[in-house]
Amino acid sequence: MQTSDFDYHLPESSIAQTPAEPRDSSRMLVLHRDSGDVEHRLFRDVGLFLRPNDLLVLNQTRVIPARIFAHKETGGKVELLLLRRRDELTWEALVGGKGLKVGKSVQVENGPRAEIIGLLEGSERLIQFSEPIEPYFPKVGNVPLPPYIHEKLSDPERYQTVYAKEPGSAAAPTAGLHFTPRLLDEIQAMGVKIAYVTLHVGLDTFAPVTEDDPEEHKIHTEWCELSQQTADLINETKCNGGRVIAVGTTSVRTLESAGQGTIFDTRSSNNEYQISPFIGPTSLYILPGYQFKVVDVMITNFHLPKSTLIMLVSAFAGREKVLSTYELAVKEGYRFYSFGDAMLIL
Protein backbone atom coordinates (compact mmCIF):
# COMPACT_ATOMS: atom_id res chain seq x y z
CA MET A 1 0.00 0.00 0.00
CA GLN A 2 1.39 3.36 -1.08
CA THR A 3 0.13 6.88 -0.42
CA SER A 4 0.01 7.40 -4.19
CA ASP A 5 -2.69 4.69 -4.30
CA PHE A 6 -5.07 7.29 -2.85
CA ASP A 7 -4.33 10.08 -5.31
CA TYR A 8 -6.75 11.34 -7.95
CA HIS A 9 -7.03 14.30 -10.30
CA LEU A 10 -9.46 17.03 -9.32
CA PRO A 11 -10.00 20.13 -11.44
CA GLU A 12 -9.93 23.31 -9.36
CA SER A 13 -13.38 24.15 -10.72
CA SER A 14 -14.78 21.14 -8.82
CA ILE A 15 -13.87 22.61 -5.41
CA ALA A 16 -16.98 24.20 -3.90
CA GLN A 17 -16.40 27.81 -2.83
CA THR A 18 -19.81 28.50 -1.32
CA PRO A 19 -22.36 26.32 0.52
CA ALA A 20 -25.54 25.09 -1.15
CA GLU A 21 -28.73 27.02 -0.41
CA PRO A 22 -30.77 25.65 1.20
CA ARG A 23 -28.49 23.21 2.97
CA ASP A 24 -30.33 20.05 1.93
CA SER A 25 -30.41 21.03 -1.75
CA SER A 26 -26.85 19.74 -2.18
CA ARG A 27 -26.43 16.66 -4.32
CA MET A 28 -25.90 13.21 -2.82
CA LEU A 29 -24.12 10.34 -4.53
CA VAL A 30 -25.29 6.99 -3.14
CA LEU A 31 -22.76 4.15 -3.30
CA HIS A 32 -23.94 0.60 -2.63
CA ARG A 33 -20.84 -1.20 -1.33
CA ASP A 34 -21.98 -4.74 -2.12
CA SER A 35 -22.89 -4.19 -5.76
CA GLY A 36 -20.89 -1.07 -6.58
CA ASP A 37 -24.08 0.49 -7.94
CA VAL A 38 -24.36 4.28 -7.81
CA GLU A 39 -27.44 6.52 -7.56
CA HIS A 40 -27.62 10.29 -7.99
CA ARG A 41 -29.95 12.07 -5.57
CA LEU A 42 -30.42 15.28 -3.62
CA PHE A 43 -29.49 15.27 0.05
CA ARG A 44 -33.08 15.89 1.10
CA ASP A 45 -33.79 12.34 -0.23
CA VAL A 46 -31.56 10.75 2.43
CA GLY A 47 -34.60 9.49 4.35
CA LEU A 48 -35.39 7.12 1.46
CA PHE A 49 -32.32 5.10 2.44
CA LEU A 50 -32.96 5.03 6.20
CA ARG A 51 -35.08 2.57 8.16
CA PRO A 52 -37.01 2.62 11.44
CA ASN A 53 -34.69 1.48 14.27
CA ASP A 54 -31.63 3.00 12.55
CA LEU A 55 -29.49 5.37 14.61
CA LEU A 56 -28.11 8.57 13.06
CA VAL A 57 -24.96 9.72 14.90
CA LEU A 58 -24.05 13.42 14.64
CA ASN A 59 -20.95 15.28 15.81
CA GLN A 60 -22.19 18.26 17.83
CA THR A 61 -18.87 20.12 17.96
CA ARG A 62 -18.96 23.84 17.21
CA VAL A 63 -16.26 25.73 15.30
CA ILE A 64 -14.70 28.46 17.39
CA PRO A 65 -13.70 31.80 15.79
CA ALA A 66 -10.10 30.73 16.23
CA ARG A 67 -8.36 33.10 13.79
CA ILE A 68 -7.14 36.11 15.77
CA PHE A 69 -5.01 39.08 14.79
CA ALA A 70 -2.42 40.66 17.08
CA HIS A 71 0.68 42.81 16.89
CA LYS A 72 4.18 42.70 18.37
CA GLU A 73 5.68 45.44 20.53
CA THR A 74 7.49 46.64 17.41
CA GLY A 75 4.13 46.98 15.64
CA GLY A 76 4.55 43.98 13.35
CA LYS A 77 1.36 42.06 12.57
CA VAL A 78 0.81 38.55 13.93
CA GLU A 79 -1.87 36.00 13.14
CA LEU A 80 -2.86 33.40 15.74
CA LEU A 81 -4.82 30.31 14.79
CA LEU A 82 -5.97 28.59 17.97
CA LEU A 83 -5.89 24.81 17.64
CA ARG A 84 -6.41 23.22 21.05
CA ARG A 85 -7.18 24.55 24.52
CA ARG A 86 -4.84 23.20 27.21
CA ASP A 87 -6.35 25.02 30.17
CA GLU A 88 -8.19 28.25 30.97
CA LEU A 89 -5.41 30.48 29.64
CA THR A 90 -3.18 28.19 27.56
CA TRP A 91 -3.67 27.17 23.92
CA GLU A 92 -1.77 25.38 21.19
CA ALA A 93 -1.76 27.72 18.20
CA LEU A 94 -0.33 28.24 14.74
CA VAL A 95 1.55 31.53 14.85
CA GLY A 96 2.25 33.62 11.74
CA GLY A 97 5.01 36.16 12.24
CA LYS A 98 8.79 36.33 12.57
CA GLY A 99 10.88 36.14 15.72
CA LEU A 100 8.14 34.71 17.93
CA LYS A 101 10.30 32.78 20.38
CA VAL A 102 9.62 31.71 23.95
CA GLY A 103 9.16 34.75 26.17
CA LYS A 104 7.88 37.03 23.40
CA SER A 105 4.49 38.68 23.90
CA VAL A 106 1.90 39.98 21.45
CA GLN A 107 -1.13 42.18 21.96
CA VAL A 108 -4.41 40.88 20.59
CA GLU A 109 -6.27 43.68 18.84
CA ASN A 110 -9.07 44.75 21.22
CA GLY A 111 -8.17 41.86 23.50
CA PRO A 112 -5.67 40.47 26.05
CA ARG A 113 -1.93 39.95 25.76
CA ALA A 114 -0.53 36.57 24.76
CA GLU A 115 2.91 35.22 25.66
CA ILE A 116 4.78 32.46 23.81
CA ILE A 117 5.58 29.90 26.52
CA GLY A 118 6.59 26.89 24.43
CA LEU A 119 7.79 25.78 20.98
CA LEU A 120 5.90 22.95 19.28
CA GLU A 121 6.26 21.49 15.78
CA GLY A 122 6.88 23.88 12.88
CA SER A 123 5.07 27.17 13.40
CA GLU A 124 2.98 25.80 16.27
CA ARG A 125 3.47 27.48 19.63
CA LEU A 126 2.12 27.12 23.13
CA ILE A 127 0.67 30.50 24.07
CA GLN A 128 -0.74 31.82 27.32
CA PHE A 129 -3.24 34.66 27.43
CA SER A 130 -3.30 37.18 30.27
CA GLU A 131 -7.00 36.38 30.70
CA PRO A 132 -9.44 33.89 29.10
CA ILE A 133 -9.79 34.57 25.37
CA GLU A 134 -13.28 33.09 24.90
CA PRO A 135 -15.22 36.17 26.08
CA TYR A 136 -13.36 38.17 23.39
CA PHE A 137 -14.30 35.84 20.52
CA PRO A 138 -17.31 37.91 19.39
CA LYS A 139 -15.05 40.96 18.99
CA VAL A 140 -11.70 39.55 17.89
CA GLY A 141 -12.33 36.06 16.48
CA ASN A 142 -12.77 35.02 12.86
CA VAL A 143 -13.97 31.64 11.61
CA PRO A 144 -10.99 29.87 9.97
CA LEU A 145 -12.12 28.56 6.60
CA PRO A 146 -10.10 25.80 4.87
CA PRO A 147 -7.21 27.02 2.69
CA TYR A 148 -8.90 25.93 -0.56
CA ILE A 149 -11.92 28.20 0.01
CA HIS A 150 -11.19 31.65 -1.42
CA GLU A 151 -14.67 33.19 -1.37
CA LYS A 152 -15.63 35.28 1.65
CA LEU A 153 -18.37 33.65 3.72
CA SER A 154 -21.16 36.18 4.26
CA ASP A 155 -22.78 34.22 7.12
CA PRO A 156 -20.32 32.45 9.48
CA GLU A 157 -23.15 30.18 10.69
CA ARG A 158 -23.04 28.43 7.31
CA TYR A 159 -19.76 26.88 8.46
CA GLN A 160 -21.59 25.42 11.47
CA THR A 161 -24.00 22.51 11.56
CA VAL A 162 -27.52 23.39 12.70
CA TYR A 163 -26.96 21.21 15.79
CA ALA A 164 -23.49 22.56 16.70
CA LYS A 165 -23.35 22.86 20.47
CA GLU A 166 -19.91 22.16 22.03
CA PRO A 167 -17.27 24.82 21.12
CA GLY A 168 -13.79 23.51 20.35
CA SER A 169 -13.19 22.84 16.64
CA ALA A 170 -10.83 24.63 14.28
CA ALA A 171 -12.79 23.19 11.32
CA ALA A 172 -16.37 22.05 10.78
CA PRO A 173 -17.53 18.43 10.61
CA THR A 174 -18.69 19.17 7.09
CA ALA A 175 -20.82 16.09 6.34
CA GLY A 176 -23.32 17.51 8.82
CA LEU A 177 -23.66 20.84 7.00
CA HIS A 178 -26.32 19.32 4.70
CA PHE A 179 -28.89 18.78 7.45
CA THR A 180 -31.70 21.23 8.20
CA PRO A 181 -33.90 21.17 11.34
CA ARG A 182 -36.85 20.18 9.15
CA LEU A 183 -34.97 17.26 7.59
CA LEU A 184 -33.87 16.01 11.02
CA ASP A 185 -37.50 16.18 12.20
CA GLU A 186 -38.66 14.22 9.16
CA ILE A 187 -36.02 11.55 9.76
CA GLN A 188 -37.03 11.17 13.41
CA ALA A 189 -40.71 10.96 12.41
CA MET A 190 -39.77 7.87 10.38
CA GLY A 191 -38.64 6.10 13.55
CA VAL A 192 -34.93 6.82 13.13
CA LYS A 193 -33.25 7.80 16.40
CA ILE A 194 -30.58 10.49 16.68
CA ALA A 195 -27.54 10.37 18.95
CA TYR A 196 -24.72 12.85 19.44
CA VAL A 197 -20.98 12.53 19.90
CA THR A 198 -18.34 15.25 20.16
CA LEU A 199 -15.03 15.34 18.34
CA HIS A 200 -13.17 18.63 18.15
CA VAL A 201 -11.70 18.84 14.66
CA GLY A 202 -8.13 20.04 14.20
CA LEU A 203 -6.62 21.68 11.11
CA ASP A 204 -4.53 18.54 10.52
CA THR A 205 -7.67 17.09 8.98
CA PHE A 206 -6.72 19.00 5.79
CA ALA A 207 -3.08 17.87 5.79
CA PRO A 208 -2.07 15.43 3.04
CA VAL A 209 -0.01 12.37 3.89
CA THR A 210 3.55 13.13 2.73
CA GLU A 211 5.18 9.77 3.50
CA ASP A 212 5.34 7.23 0.65
CA ASP A 213 4.06 4.54 3.01
CA PRO A 214 0.81 5.75 4.66
CA GLU A 215 1.47 3.53 7.67
CA GLU A 216 4.47 5.71 8.51
CA HIS A 217 2.27 8.81 8.76
CA LYS A 218 1.67 10.15 12.26
CA ILE A 219 -2.08 10.67 12.54
CA HIS A 220 -3.32 13.79 14.28
CA THR A 221 -4.79 13.42 17.78
CA GLU A 222 -8.22 14.86 18.49
CA TRP A 223 -10.36 15.00 21.63
CA CYS A 224 -13.67 13.20 21.51
CA GLU A 225 -16.53 12.04 23.72
CA LEU A 226 -19.20 9.37 23.42
CA SER A 227 -21.64 9.61 26.34
CA GLN A 228 -23.44 6.88 28.26
CA GLN A 229 -26.70 7.97 26.63
CA THR A 230 -25.24 7.53 23.15
CA ALA A 231 -23.66 4.20 24.12
CA ASP A 232 -27.07 2.98 25.33
CA LEU A 233 -28.70 4.02 22.03
CA ILE A 234 -26.01 2.21 20.02
CA ASN A 235 -26.41 -0.97 22.06
CA GLU A 236 -30.20 -0.81 21.73
CA THR A 237 -29.97 -0.20 17.97
CA LYS A 238 -27.60 -3.11 17.36
CA CYS A 239 -29.65 -5.50 19.49
CA ASN A 240 -32.83 -4.54 17.59
CA GLY A 241 -31.24 -5.13 14.19
CA GLY A 242 -30.87 -1.44 13.32
CA ARG A 243 -27.89 0.23 11.70
CA VAL A 244 -25.50 2.82 13.11
CA ILE A 245 -25.20 5.61 10.53
CA ALA A 246 -22.17 7.84 11.11
CA VAL A 247 -22.43 11.38 9.78
CA GLY A 248 -18.88 12.33 8.83
CA THR A 249 -15.45 10.86 9.37
CA THR A 250 -15.28 12.60 12.76
CA SER A 251 -18.28 10.60 13.98
CA VAL A 252 -16.68 7.45 12.51
CA ARG A 253 -13.45 8.04 14.44
CA THR A 254 -15.34 8.67 17.67
CA LEU A 255 -17.55 5.59 17.31
CA GLU A 256 -14.69 3.31 16.35
CA SER A 257 -12.44 4.73 19.10
CA ALA A 258 -15.12 3.78 21.61
CA GLY A 259 -15.28 0.34 20.01
CA GLN A 260 -11.57 -0.40 20.37
CA GLY A 261 -10.73 -3.23 22.74
CA THR A 262 -14.37 -4.25 23.07
CA ILE A 263 -15.54 -7.64 21.85
CA PHE A 264 -19.04 -7.60 20.43
CA ASP A 265 -20.84 -10.93 20.20
CA THR A 266 -23.71 -10.31 17.82
CA ARG A 267 -24.31 -14.06 17.43
CA SER A 268 -25.24 -14.71 21.05
CA SER A 269 -28.77 -15.85 21.86
CA ASN A 270 -29.79 -12.52 23.40
CA ASN A 271 -28.02 -10.37 20.79
CA GLU A 272 -25.68 -8.82 23.32
CA TYR A 273 -23.84 -5.77 22.04
CA GLN A 274 -22.12 -3.59 24.59
CA ILE A 275 -20.20 -0.48 23.66
CA SER A 276 -19.01 1.66 26.57
CA PRO A 277 -18.77 5.45 26.91
CA PHE A 278 -15.50 7.01 25.80
CA ILE A 279 -13.87 10.34 26.56
CA GLY A 280 -10.37 11.56 25.80
CA PRO A 281 -7.86 11.89 22.95
CA THR A 282 -8.00 9.57 19.96
CA SER A 283 -5.28 8.89 17.43
CA LEU A 284 -7.17 6.08 15.70
CA TYR A 285 -5.81 5.74 12.16
CA ILE A 286 -8.19 3.86 9.86
CA LEU A 287 -6.57 2.37 6.76
CA PRO A 288 -7.77 -0.33 4.33
CA GLY A 289 -7.80 -3.64 6.16
CA TYR A 290 -9.40 -2.12 9.25
CA GLN A 291 -12.40 -4.07 10.58
CA PHE A 292 -15.23 -1.71 11.49
CA LYS A 293 -16.84 -2.61 14.82
CA VAL A 294 -19.59 -0.01 15.14
CA VAL A 295 -20.33 1.88 11.90
CA ASP A 296 -22.71 0.28 9.39
CA VAL A 297 -23.46 3.22 7.06
CA MET A 298 -21.53 6.41 6.41
CA ILE A 299 -22.55 9.88 5.22
CA THR A 300 -19.54 11.91 4.16
CA ASN A 301 -18.28 14.53 1.71
CA PHE A 302 -15.67 14.11 -1.04
CA HIS A 303 -12.16 14.30 0.44
CA LEU A 304 -8.73 15.56 -0.55
CA PRO A 305 -6.34 13.31 -2.47
CA LYS A 306 -3.78 11.42 -0.37
CA SER A 307 -5.51 12.45 2.88
CA THR A 308 -6.20 10.27 5.90
CA LEU A 309 -9.90 10.88 5.24
CA ILE A 310 -9.97 9.32 1.77
CA MET A 311 -8.01 6.42 3.28
CA LEU A 312 -10.69 6.02 5.97
CA VAL A 313 -13.47 6.03 3.37
CA SER A 314 -11.49 3.53 1.29
CA ALA A 315 -11.24 1.25 4.32
CA PHE A 316 -15.04 1.34 4.56
CA ALA A 317 -16.01 0.99 0.89
CA GLY A 318 -12.89 -0.35 -0.86
CA ARG A 319 -10.18 1.75 -2.49
CA GLU A 320 -11.02 0.83 -6.09
CA LYS A 321 -14.73 1.53 -5.58
CA VAL A 322 -14.02 4.88 -3.93
CA LEU A 323 -11.60 6.08 -6.60
CA SER A 324 -13.85 5.02 -9.47
CA THR A 325 -16.80 6.71 -7.74
CA TYR A 326 -14.76 9.90 -7.27
CA GLU A 327 -13.85 9.81 -10.97
CA LEU A 328 -17.54 9.49 -11.82
CA ALA A 329 -18.41 12.32 -9.41
CA VAL A 330 -15.96 14.64 -11.19
CA LYS A 331 -17.49 13.78 -14.56
CA GLU A 332 -21.01 14.31 -13.20
CA GLY A 333 -20.15 17.74 -11.85
CA TYR A 334 -20.33 17.04 -8.11
CA ARG A 335 -18.89 19.72 -5.86
CA PHE A 336 -15.96 18.63 -3.67
CA TYR A 337 -14.59 19.28 -0.16
CA SER A 338 -16.05 21.22 2.77
CA PHE A 339 -18.89 23.09 1.04
CA GLY A 340 -19.34 20.35 -1.52
CA ASP A 341 -21.87 17.59 -2.08
CA ALA A 342 -22.46 14.48 -0.01
CA MET A 343 -21.81 10.79 -0.43
CA LEU A 344 -23.97 8.13 1.23
CA ILE A 345 -22.17 4.78 1.52
CA LEU A 346 -24.51 1.87 2.22
Image (cartoon, helix red, strand yellow):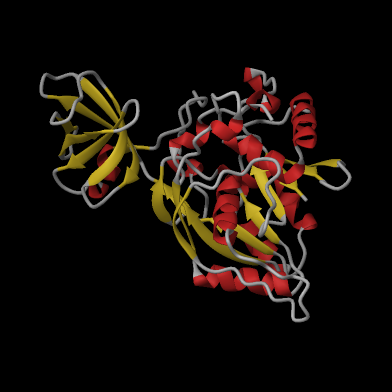
Taking the spot 47% from the left edge, 40% from the top edge, the residue there is: 220
Tell me if residue 9 comes above or below residue 325 in the rendering. Answer: above
Q: Looking at the image, which is closer to me, 322 or 257?
A: 257
Tell me if residue 228 comes above or below residue 61 in the rendering. Answer: below
**Residue 270: image location, x then y, percent:** 74, 81
**Residue 86: image location, x then y, percent:** 29, 48
Q: Residue furthest left?
A: 73
**Residue 251: image location, x then y, percent:** 57, 53
Q: Looking at the image, which is closer to me, 323 or 274?
A: 274
Q: Looking at the image, which is closer to me, 196 or 312?
A: 312
Quadrant of residue 112 within the rendered picture: top left
Tell me if residue 326 comes above or below residue 21 in the rendering. Answer: above
Quadrant of residue 118 within the rendered picture: top left
Q: Residue furthest bottom?
A: 270
Looking at the image, residue 43 sits to the left or right of residue 194; the answer is right
Taking the spot 69% from the left edge, 67% from the top edge, the residue there is: 192
**Residue 128: image location, x then y, percent:** 19, 41
Tell me if residue 144 comes above or below residue 249 in the rendering. Answer: above
The answer, for residue 307, to whether it is visible in the render is no
Q: Looking at the image, which is closer to me, 119 or 186?
A: 119
Quadrant of residue 65 within the rendered picture: top left
Looking at the image, residue 113 sits to the left or right of residue 6; the answer is left
Classify the position of the N terminus by image quarter: top right
